[in-house]
Image: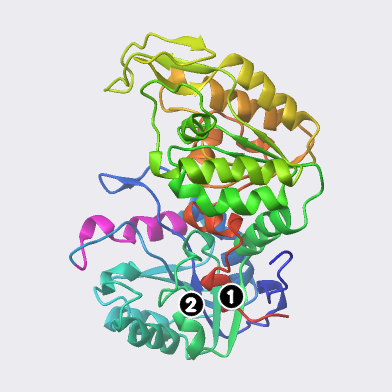
Amino acid sequence: MAGLNKITVEDLNVKGKKVLVRVDFNVPLKDGVITNDNRITAALPTINKLTENGAKVVLCSHLGKPKNGPEDKFSLAPAAARLAELVTAKVTFAKDDTVVGENAKKAVAEMGEGDIVVLENTRFRGAEETKNGEEFAKELAELVDGEVFVMDAFGSAHRAHASTAGVTKFVKETAVGYLMQKEINFLGNAVEDPVRPFVAILGGAKVADKLNVINNLIEKCDTLIIGGGMAYTFLKAQGKEIGTSLVDDTKLDYCKEMIEKAAKAGKKLLLPVDTTITKSFPDPIDAEIEVEVSETIPADMMGLDIGTKTQELYAEAVKSAKTVVWNGPMGVFENPILAKGTIAVAKSLAETDATTIIGGGDSAAAVISLGFADKMSHISTGGGASLEYLEGKVLPGIDVIADK
């Protein structure tokens, strides 16, 4: 998987050709206004490269989860409007409930070299992976005369949908965009061919979400650090008292196995040595919390973040690392009082000279909201996709692209 040698936008001669690009414009919207345009700006290098080289660029993306076919609140119109502000190329939004309808066909027919057409939300066609998927994939390909498809939506690469994988059956040339290339280089190389020592940090609530990741990373890394809600299942598996903390009793044997597996392989597996505890989990999240730090969790208390000694232990482990991958927060980081563990880990990553890779989702949100984004080597744009990549899975949206 490491250093996958895929054809990239650099390898294409696109002058005068129609190029379908699968981007990730799944941006957060509030009352029809984009609240964060990171995903649009992340796609600009690929889009600009193609338009500057004289391609006719057709963009497609999903947005949200429309349940009942087309819904205005899930339209890509705001994303197309924002893109038009960010590029010098001419941008046309083709509003069609069927995605590839009369407006799209007309807009594409009238394109000049270097122009951009943005199609409506691909999910307006219903589930892209169902049997209408093949038909839809064919229509998308026909829109660009079956010429070129560029995959640049890493966040959707783990789904074998019409617009991410299916379309490749009906086009002559395929390539990955700059964003995909970066994800493949950072995540792929980190796991398959890391500069050592390689430290992996996993957090988040549930052990169940990370079963295969834990298993795969124990084989690959030198030190595995575990925090977040899933740490309590590991602690209970060791026979420790965890009070009323989140636990998955069905995974205790699995946690024991992983602890043994790490020991046998001579890998360090670090678990919390102290915990930030409180009587009950507050709702709403900004309620006052009584917090104390404890080595053992009393029967009527629950753990909601790693404690101060654990923060120091984890920071120390990161100091000597050369490669660090982090996926999942250390506690309920949305609450400032319970964000200290996550902040400490983010800070230790910001201060290291190692290659630091943030595996999307909540850890990416944490790093960005805490102001450490510019200190990280790479922040993945995929939540589920980066997790599956860390599991060592082949992602369909990458697999279908031609090799060099």
The residues colored magenta run 69-84
- Examine the rendering and report whether any part of residue 120 can be seen: no
Say which residue label 1 marks.
Answer: 399
Q: Is residue 396 above or below residue 173?
A: above
Q: How far across and how far down the image is residue 400, in percent?
A: 56, 79
Q: Residue at x 69, y 80 (%)?
A: 403
Query: Which amino acid type is shown beneath numbered disc 2?
Result: Ala
Q: Give the residue at mark 2.
A: 165
The mark that comes first in sequence, 1 or 2, is: 2
Left or right of 322 in this view: 166: left
Tell me the kind of residue under disc 1.
Asp
Residue 314, percent across and down? 67, 27
Q: Name the residue: 35% across, 84% down.
A: 105
Q: Is residue 74 magenta?
A: yes
- Of the two numbered discs 1 and 2 in the rendering, the one whose residue sits closer to the viewer: 1
Q: Is residue 152 visible?
A: yes
Tell me the SS state at disc 1: helix
Q: How is the image coloured?
A: rainbow
The image's mark for residue 240 is: none
Secondary structure predominantly adopted by residues drawn in magenta: helix
Q: For this rendering, which residue is in front, 113 or 252?
A: 252
Distance Cα–Cα, label 1 vs label 2: 8 Å
